[in-house]
Amino acid sequence: MRVATFAAPLSRDGPGLLLRDLNKGDDDSLNAIAAAIMQAAPDVLVLTDFDYDLDGLALAAFAQMFDGRYPFMFARTPNSGFATGYDIDGNGRTGDARDAQGYGRFAGDGGLAILSRFPIETGAVVDFSSLLWRDVPGAVLPQIDGQPFFASGILDVLRLSSTAHWIVPIRLPDETKVSIMAFSATPPVFDGPEDMNGLRSRDELRLWEHVLDGRYGPPPDRFVVVGNSNLDPVNGDGDSAAMQAFLSRPDIRDPHKGITNGDWGDGGPGKLRVSYVLPSTNWRIVGAGTQSPALDAVTDGQSDAIAGPHSLVWVDIGR
């Protein structure tokens, strides 16, 4: 079974615009992204920047680009764009994109979505997305000059997940179940000296540590941690040591050691590893790789501008 994640730019500037572009059928970005997915041909795909709509119309339209390969889909309302009513970033205004539970210009902006060839047990999904940041064991909350950064009342509503944290059981043809631990964390940048996003990104990863350590009940047996942590274990901003520690866990395999999967060029942070597919040790690793959108899939050769800086990351697992 091939499990993959792709932080492809499948979000737009407003609600309904992704569905509009999908229905048009001539969008260069969507065609380049779809071509990369078709070439990699994953059995289970976690998309970490996909606009959510209540009826799942955009996800269904996107799945139609693959000629019936993905009959099973899953998405829920993400925290991205979900209004808090508070001035989260402390700029004196409310209602900005950074004042939502997770950065978002509208409700559902850049959410999580899963496409699968195999049945998804939606009734057994475990969703940690409503967990408050302050309630995570060992949470480190931002401060300024030794004082809390957040104004009164914010910690009563602010969730940990900037997008979502799900454990999604998928039933394979041999009746084996794989638990997809899907998430997409905030980039550890775009903040100030309080390091709000850096601290939150680390704690979004730490939540999976607590889950696997059994602090939220029995941990999943056969699992794959899948998504965009926005943390590189060596370079870039953020807590690289936290990512290194997670990759070193005895219950996780890391088949992509030393391989980057995002390239922001010389004007940005350069090449980083931010997306991960990490099977539990009771899976056998059959193969692993990455797939970038092909230059010939777009008309002007601007693959980064059209299909984003991220590569699709995949791992083949077996029993």
Image (spheres, helix red, strand yellow):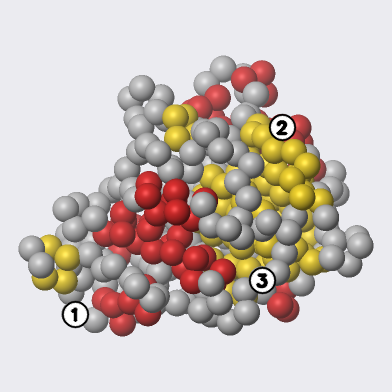
Task: Describe residue 213's horizontal placement relative to residue 281 as left or right.
Answer: left
Residue lying farthest to the right in this orientation = 174
Measured along the vertical axis of the image, is residue 44 above or below residue 310?
below
Going by the numbered disc 3, the residue's amino acid type is Pro
Nearest to the observer: residue 273 or residue 245: 245
Nearer to us: label 2 or label 3: 3
Measured along the vertical axis of the image, is residue 247 above or below residue 131?
above
Who's the residue at 22% across and 65% down the image? Answer: 142
> Which label sits on residue 152?
1
CA gap, disc 1 to disc 2? Answer: 48 Å
Crowdedness of circle 1 by 10 Å Cα count: few (<14), some, many (20+)? few
Q: Is residue 225 visible?
A: no
Secondary structure state at the residue bearing disc 2: helix
Who's the residue at 68% across and 46% down the image? Answer: 4
Nearest to the observer: residue 238 or residue 262: 238
Is tag 3's residue or tag 1's residue first in the polypeptide sequence?
A: 1
Is tag 1's residue or tag 2's residue first in the polypeptide sequence?
A: 2
Crowdedness of circle 3 by 10 Å Cα count: few (<14), some, many (20+)? some
Residue 8 % position (x, y): 57, 41
The answer to whether the residues at label 1 and label 2 have Cβ atoms under 8 Å apart is no
Q: In which quarter of the image is residue 30?
A: top right
Secondary structure state at the residue bearing disc 3: loop
Reading the image, the residue beneath label 3 is 220
Residue lying farthest to the left in this orientation = 145
Residue 143 % position (x, y): 17, 65
Who's the residue at 38% across and 57% down the image? Answer: 201
Residue 151 % position (x, y): 18, 74
The answer to whether the residues at label 2 and label 3 have Cβ atoms under 8 Å apart is no
Going by the numbered disc 1, the residue's amino acid type is Ser
Reading the image, the residue beneath label 2 is 35
Going by the numbered disc 2, the residue's amino acid type is Ala
CA gap, disc 2 to disc 3? Answer: 33 Å
